[in-house]
Amino acid sequence: EKIDMSRFSVENTRNFSIIAHVDHGKSTLADRLLELTGAIDKTKNNKQVLDKLQVERERGITVKAQTASLFYNCEGKQYLLNLIDTPGHVDFSYEVSRSLSACQGVLLVVDANEGIQAQTVANFFLAFEAQLSVIPVINKIDLKNADPERVEKQIEKVFDIPRNECIKISAKLGTNVERVLQAVIERIPPPKVHRKNSLKALVFDSTFDQYRGVIANVALFDGMVSKGDKIVSAHTKKTYEVNEVGVLNPNEQPTHKLYAGQVGYLIAGMKDVTEAQIGDTLYLHKQPVEPLPGFKSAKPMVFAGMYPIDQSEYNNLKSAVEKLTINDSSVTVHRDSSLALGAGWRLGFLGLLHMEVFNQRLEQEYNASVILTTPTVPYKAVLSSAKLIKEYREKEITIINPAQFPDKSKVTEYLEPVVLGTIITPDEYIGKVMMLCQARRAVQKNMMYIDQNRVMLKYLFPLNEIVVDFYDSLKSLSSGYASFDYEDAGYQTAELVKMDILLNGNIVEELVTIVHKDKAHSVGKVICERLKDSLPRQLFEIAIQAAIGSKIIARETVKAYRKNVLAKCYGGDITRKMKLLKRQAEGKKKLRKIGNIEVPKDAFIKVLRTQSDK
């Protein structure tokens, strides 16, 4: 039966989300809150109920923000609490910032054992900038090494939140979780909305269902919506009829209507994936409203080429990518093609983990297997002459594909993206961490002790230095204690060069890379060694060279197969042997002129795979 949502007045509605660093217990706390309010039954096997995707289950991380509406009785009043559980990794901070737009307050969860970590700080400032009320929750007090007092001091020092506001809980055992719900009701303000006005709703997330089309998650700012209403999208100006509205409790539960201040889902027969733009405003037909500001579009940090393993799969892969990008709106897609790998795309991701998860979801949800090339970052080049500016139609061009890197003669300077990284580490590892950062061309900006033995370091990093394996190196240096988070910090000038890979003097388009001048030798050597291992031997020798312009900086040689031409000589004069060997050498030389090298696909994949398994 359908729930009547009019019982819940605006004063009795609270919208909040849970934010924290990775593994501090957001989803576990969400499970307890769901159990307390009777949304799910209390059983032993409620573990991260809101993490529904297979990727999330396997990796034990949250990737998508999930919504759930809870009904809670407190002092005789029925409250409606809309909870949004968010991811913790820096790669998914776009999900967090979107979820906060539908909230008035947040629960900031901090692990009593680990204390404040990098992502805790980043997420706190996201909430602080959105002017939401913050309730600090110290979790995992049941662990034997837990030190909630120390964490309270950290929270007071870093965030200026008085100690007595912290709630100490254990989400696993359910200790004190009731207090959290009461704090939500007392400390988080109800949404400021008007039910009398006409409908104004924000689409903050959407998924694609094969049978029902697009399911949009909406937060209502004004008015109400019910089944059968005609609604218009402010972005596409198309009109739809609402087929179903409801709340997620955590599963879909249809209702008669949704009112302002509430968060729910809406199905309106949007068949095409491009129609449900995230950040779009919906309003009633013939009652237009001022559209909501929407979201800043996510800024991709890492680009990688993606190609179907077999070209006949291209169309299936295309529809799979379209459906996945509606669910994960932070991926950007450009068409691309390559000589060796055929037609494909250049995808922009927010980070490496994001790229891996996207790839894994393609495989699991759409059984599409793909080739992903080495991730690169977007560079910029400032053009030198007016003629070139006219040709490209702008002074600064952005380069996302290394093959299109302009020549030095056309450019006054190259720019590379930089990020402001925050590292929080125990102080015994400071030396090692600083060495690592300097090796990655980082510049130190600031250093602050957040308590007796924790340090917060701020560095400016060139993005291409940290994109591949910085996080892994940091974790292994600091025995897993250091945490890392970064935010975009614009561009800076850099000495970049384009490095070509030559096989017997012919350039291989797909292996072109952009590197910093100081690192060119080492990177070139690594690529040549990898190619040497993965290219099959021929009857003639292959010279693999890395070159910058016309200067060769590294070389490896794949030796030729040789027939033993001396097998028939037994004893006899040395000149006989020399004659045969010389004749063989001439033959090989002639072969090398006419033989051309086909680089097999698997050799490409081996070389293009990320450079981490050196």
Image: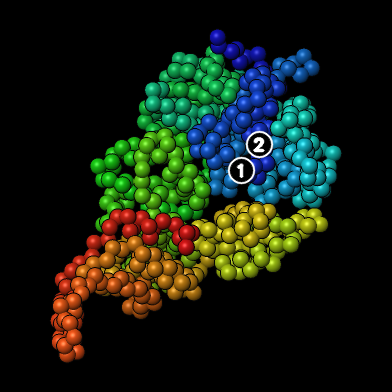
On the image, numbered disc 1 is attached to which residue? 88
Chain-order first, disc 1 or disc 2 = 2
Q: Which residue is mark 2?
A: 26
Compare residues 387 and 582 and report the one nearer the observer.
582
Q: Position of residue 306 (x, y in %)?
A: 36, 49
Amino acid type at circle 1 is Gly
Which residue corresponds to the image point at 72% horizontal and 42% vertical from the top-left? Answer: 110
Q: Residue at x 35, y 67 (%)?
A: 532
- Give percent across and percent down for residue 418: 54, 61
Q: Residue at x 76, y 40 (%)?
A: 143
Question: Up-down: is 515 above or below 155?
Answer: below
Q: Secondary structure at mark 1?
A: loop
In the rendered image, which quarter is residue 198 located in?
top right
Q: Is residue 172 visible?
A: yes
CA separation, marks 1 and 2? 8 Å
| Category of crowding for the residue at label 1, using alpha-carbon neighbours closer than 10 angstroms: few (below 14), some (14–19), many (at least 20) | many
Horizontal and vertical percent position of residue 347? 40, 49
Please indicate whether residue 185 sits to the left or right of residue 544 in the image: right
Q: Are marks 1 and 2 in contact (CB under 8 Å)?
A: yes
Left or right: residue 124 versus residue 613 is right
- Figure check: 396 above or below 212: below
Q: Amino acid at mark 2?
A: Lys
Q: Residues within 10 Å of mark 2 (few under 14, many from 20)?
A: many
